[in-house]
Amino acid sequence: MPVIGRIGRPGLLGMAARTAVVAGTATAVSGAVASRQQARAAAAEPHHEMPVPTPPPPPAMVVPDSSQEDLVAQIQQLAALHAQGILSAEEFALAKQRLLGI
């Protein structure tokens, strides 16, 4: 029996091969265009180097002495009394000024 060749549209394998060739060509062309555009943009625009910021120095460690801790604790106690309504705003301000020596 003679083998009859396919007439008309290509078969599944032929379509897959054609699609692969078209896709590969499109990828190659788009990659070349993109690299050419990048090269032109790089040539047209001068490069400016960004200065590297230096990190700020670490904050100085303040070691509170016991008198400062006592003063802070006393002011916190006054603030707590003021928040509870035991001290008025004027009384709180006067007591704080006495503690601070103002």
Image: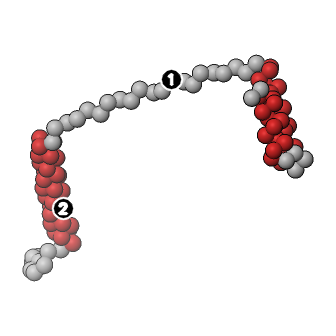
Q: Is residue 86 visible?
A: yes
Identify which residue is drawn at 15% across, 63% down. Answer: 22
* Helix, strand or loop at mark 2: helix
Instruction: Rate crowding at label 1 as few (under 14), some (14 to 19) or many (20 or more) other CA atoms within 10 Å.
Output: few
Identify which residue is drawn at 50% across, 23% down. Answer: 57
> Residue 40: where, in percent of width, then height?
11, 46
Q: CA distance from mark 1 to mark 2?
A: 56 Å
Instruction: Rate crowding at label 2 as few (under 14), some (14 to 19) or many (20 or more) other CA atoms within 10 Å.
Output: few
Q: Classify residue 26 by image quadrant.
A: bottom left
> Residue 14: where, in percent of width, then height?
16, 69
> Residue 2: where, in percent of width, then height?
9, 78
Residue topped by disc 1: 57
Check the image and report above or below for 25 versus 80: below
Residue 23: mark in rendering: 2
25 sits to left or right of 86 = left
Which three-letter amino acid code belongs to the residue tagged 2? Ala
96 sits to left or right of 57 = right
> Residue 67: where, in percent of width, then height?
80, 20
Identify which residue is drawn at 82% across, 41% down. Answer: 92
Q: Nearer the viewer, residue 7 or 95?
A: 95
Q: Nearer the viewer, residue 63 or 76?
A: 76
Which is more N-terminal, label 2 or label 1? 2
Which three-letter amino acid code belongs to the residue tagged 1? Pro
Check the image and report above or below for 13 versus 24: below
Q: Is residue 17 visible?
A: no
